[in-house]
Structure formats: structure tokens, C-alpha cells
Amino acid sequence: MNRNKCAACFRQFNKLEHLVEHMRISYHSGHEPTCAICRKHCRSFESLREHLIGPLPKQECRDIFAYRGCKFCLKVFDSPNSRRVHQEKCQLSGLTGMIGRFSSMGLRDNLTIGSRGAPVVALACKMVGGGSDGSLDLCARVCIIDEHENIIFHSYVKPPFPVTNYRYETTGIRAEYLRDAIPMRQVQRKIQDFLCNGEPMWTIRARGGKARILVGHGLDHDLECLQIEYRPEKIRDTAKYPPLMKTSKLSNSLKYLTQTYLGYDIQTGIQDPYDDCVATMRLYKRMRSQAHRMEDYPLASDPQNRNNFASWRQSELERMSPEQMLEISRSDYYCWCMDSLYTS
């Protein structure tokens, strides 16, 4: 029966042809979240969390994980003491004191187009309401930070339409803050030029080049409100990254991701876009630092790999072992660990 058992998720099939079909549509790879105890592959960290500490976990894995596992990054260590030392570092602290207060001033503008460094930046916006009922999102505050959580740009933004709801309870924004703010069109050009970093939009490619990697949560919405277009190859969105999504393939909130994977709370009371930038950057760096096998990383959707499990190879595939099939299987998403080859 093991001959018909998936080497990644351990599902068993009555016939080998059914296993081949499963591999054809599952997109298993070494970049999936994997249990450090039994080596089972999961589609997301939430699925892995359920496997280890959910309502119906695998008993053997749960017992070992409870003794030696980190509840944030889900790694397993040699001893409880090693786990304790690691978890003290793995659980990050929120932003308090002088840094948090200074970041709220909205007075920093270090955007230097064409400057060196900062190959990865995080962006977050806070919205006020426009329209007759205040439901139209208008960007009124934007923040950009570098990998080291230094503020590159943090400013109030004057929306192009009248504000009918300042949403003060969460934004902390008052009318006087926007009176002399930078106009939206000027902010848009400034950020667009900074992200492209002197590289024409149509020449930007996934790897290499001068254009910056942009990190954030729900970036489609932020960029739409800023009226900015940017190449998807350079976007790292924690709301759309499969390993950070729910088992149901829906997005998790940034508040949940920060609490669950970083160990602290954000977005309580008046919200600062700097806090959101830091949270997304920390999540990105945690995903990027995963110790996966570094190899050429073609996706299953790429033309050169589309035929890995093509029907005309059925006889050949059925002669393979489950491990061999896993070896040729390709992911259907780009793993952020590969960015470490180009940003370190």
C-alpha cells in the first residue's frame, strides 16, 4: 500500500494512477510548510498548526511538539531548554516608547530616488472616508520603511476628494492634519519613482534589476488608493501568500498573523501605519529566512514544467516511486525564501 502513498501529504490511494493524478494537481514541493516530526507537507502554516496543536492533532506529533516545539515558527528543537531560548527570541515585541511616538509624527521624508540600498521596503496606508456615506476609502497617511524598520517616508496625504468621515477612533486623523498635507498626486509620483528606482516599469523583472521589492498586507487596495501601478513580480503580500493563508484559502488579517507568528498585538485603538509596516516586514523576513533547499525554482505553471505530470507520461510516472514523483513536482507559488539569493 505504501507504493500508493503520497510522499508529501501521506494520503493513500487504491491505485497508482490515482496517486499520479493527485500529484498532478497537488503541487507538492520542498517549499511547503512541513512537520519537523513526521515530515508531512501542509499547504499552509495554519494547516501545519492544526496538525500539531489543533483540535484534532496527530497525537505523536502533538506530544513531541508540546515538549520541544516553538508555537510561533513551529520549529522543533532538541530539548525543552533549546526551545525556551529560541522562543524568547522568536516572540517579538511590539513597538512602544520613543520609536512608536516618533513614527506617529508623520514628518519624515527620506525618499531619495535612485539611492542605493533598501532593496526591500514595506508600505502601509491608513484610510479616511469619502463619499456621501463615508464608505469610500481615501488614503490620508502612508508609511514606508526599510528592512531594518527605519522610516524612509511617513506623511499625511491630502486626498483628491472631500473627506466626510475621518474615522478618528482608528486613524487618529483630524481635519487640520490634512490641511497642509502633501497632495495625493505628488505622493503618488514620489513613491512610484522610488519603487521603480530608475528602472522603466516595462523592463522590471522578477529577479535582479534596480526596482525594489514591495512588502505589505492587502497591497492591491493600498496601491489602488494611492493610484500606483507596480509589477506583481516585485510584490510580496502577506494577505495573498499561500503559506500564510487560512486552510480555506482565504486571507488572514494582519492582526491575526502578527499575534500568531510574531507573538505580539497590533491595531489596538488608534492605528499607526508604521506598526503595520514593521509587522509585514517581520513576517516577510521570517518567511524569507526558511531553510529550504536552494535550487532553480520553476513554478508548475511555467511552460517548461507544465508537462511534469502530463498525461502522455502516465506509464513513466506510474513506474516512479512516490519519492521520485515528489522530486519532480513543482510548487504553484513563488517561495519567498528564494529572495534571499537576491537581497542578502
Image: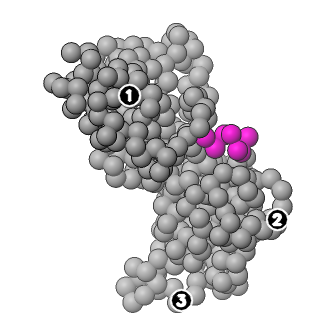
Q: Tell me the amino acid under the disc marked 2.
A: Gly
Q: Position of residue 167 (x, y in %)?
A: 47, 74
User: Image point 49% across, 46% down: which residue?
Assistant: 304
SS state under label 3: loop
Single out the mark in the foreground, 1 or 2. 1
Q: Are marks 1 and 2 in contact (CB under 8 Å)?
A: no
Tell me if residue 342 is in the magenta stretch: yes
Q: Is residue 276 left or right of residue 329?
A: right
Range of magenta residues? 338-344
Q: Is residue 160 left or right of residue 341?
A: left
Q: Tell me the amino acid under the disc marked 3.
A: Phe
SS state under label 1: helix
Tell me the quadrant of the picture where the N terminus can be found.
Answer: top left
Q: Which residue is denoted by mark 3 in the rendering? A: 161
Q: Which residue is denoted by mark 2 in the rendering? A: 114
Q: Is residue 48 left or right of residue 168?
A: left
Q: Position of residue 239 (x, y in %)?
A: 45, 54
**Sequence-first tag of 2 and 3:** 2
Q: Which residue is denoted by mark 1 in the rendering? A: 325
Tell me if residue 13 is in the magenta stretch: no
Q: CA distance from mark 1 to mark 2?
A: 46 Å
**Sequence-first tag of 1 and 2:** 2
- Corner quadrant of residue 290: top right
SS state under label 2: loop
User: Image point 33% across, 36% down: which residue?
Assistant: 313
Tell me the quadrant of the picture where the C terminus can be found.
Answer: top right
